[in-house]
Image: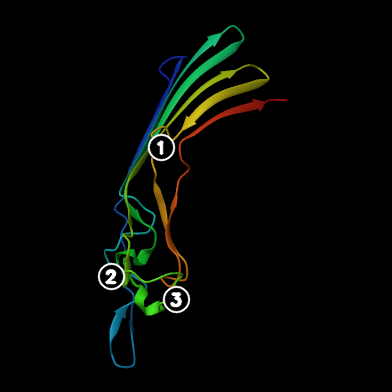
Amino acid sequence: MEVTASPNEHWDLAFSTGLNDAKLLSTVTTTDTLGVTTVVGGVKKGNRLPSVPRVQGSGSITYSLPIGVSRVSVSGSFQYVGSRYTQIDDLTPGIGTVNIAAFGANMGGPMTQPTFTFNPLLPAYSLFNFRVGLSRTGWEGAVFLNNVTDERALLALDRERGLRARVGYLTNQPRTLGVSLRFNY
């Protein structure tokens, strides 16, 4: 659902939300020579599709005011992304536990534990942005603050070579204060 409105020449409002129940409708299996059947790569009926949150939404509000030949604007925006998985096999039982003892003692230091665990379910996050701008006929300038609350959003789970190498989360940009200038010619 998406709603946008400009109730007058000063205000612009926008809101959107999405609800997704994106799941696999069938299972893919393989049977080995001994007759043992296993699910292939997590493609199992009912598993959630990767990178698809059940709930997501965004909103923005802008107030602008003409001052002589210039226009001043103040904007705020919000984005919410619900929990989601990165890969289709993230719902496979045991996927979040790696037996690091199997790699041997030569892992860059002494072994302090036999397993490494992580949660493949990426948590929900919310981002807020703020912007104040001044525009004229030939140029526009703005000061912005993105990720106002300095939220550390886990965007994806990165697994090199399956689970046999580095496991880490890809994250968003931290709180950022900046200035932008744009010229029209």
Q: Give how far apart the Cα atoms at labels 3 and 1 are.
A: 37 Å
Circle 1: element type: loop
Q: Percent from the top left, x then y, of residue 45?
A: 28, 67
Q: Quadrant of the C terminus?
A: top right
Q: Which residue is mark 3?
A: 106
Q: Which residue is mark 1?
A: 150
Look at label 3 and name its amino acid.
Asn
Look at label 1 and name its amino acid.
Asp
Look at label 2 and name its amino acid.
Gly
Q: Is residue 24 above or below residue 66?
A: below
- Kindly give the residue lying farthest to the right in the view shown: 185
| Comes first in the chain, label 3 or label 1 | 3
- Whether residue 160 sits left or right of residue 56 in the image: it is right
Which is in the foreground here, disc 3 or disc 1? 3
Q: Percent from the top left, x then y, of residue 173?
A: 48, 42
Q: Residue sitting at 38 percent across and 36 percent down?
A: 58
Q: Quadrant of the N terminus?
A: top left
Circle 2: element type: loop
Q: Decide if residue 40 is in sight here.
A: no
Residue 183: mark in rendering: none
- Whether residue 160 sits left or right of residue 39 in the image: it is right
Q: Percent from the top left, x then y, of residue 66?
A: 54, 10
- Whether residue 63 sits left or right of residue 116 in the image: it is right
Q: Give how far apart the Cα atoms at labels 1 and 2 are.
A: 32 Å
Q: Are marks 1 and 2 in contact (CB under 8 Å)?
A: no
For label 2, the crowd category at 10 Å Cα-Cα, with few meaning under 14, some 14 to 19 and many 20 or more, is few
Q: Which residue is mark 2?
A: 94
Which is in the foreground here, disc 2 or disc 3? 3
| Comes first in the chain, label 1 or label 2 | 2
Q: Is residue 61 above or below residue 107?
A: above
Q: Is residue 96 above or below residue 140?
A: below
| Comes first in the chain, label 2 or label 3 | 2
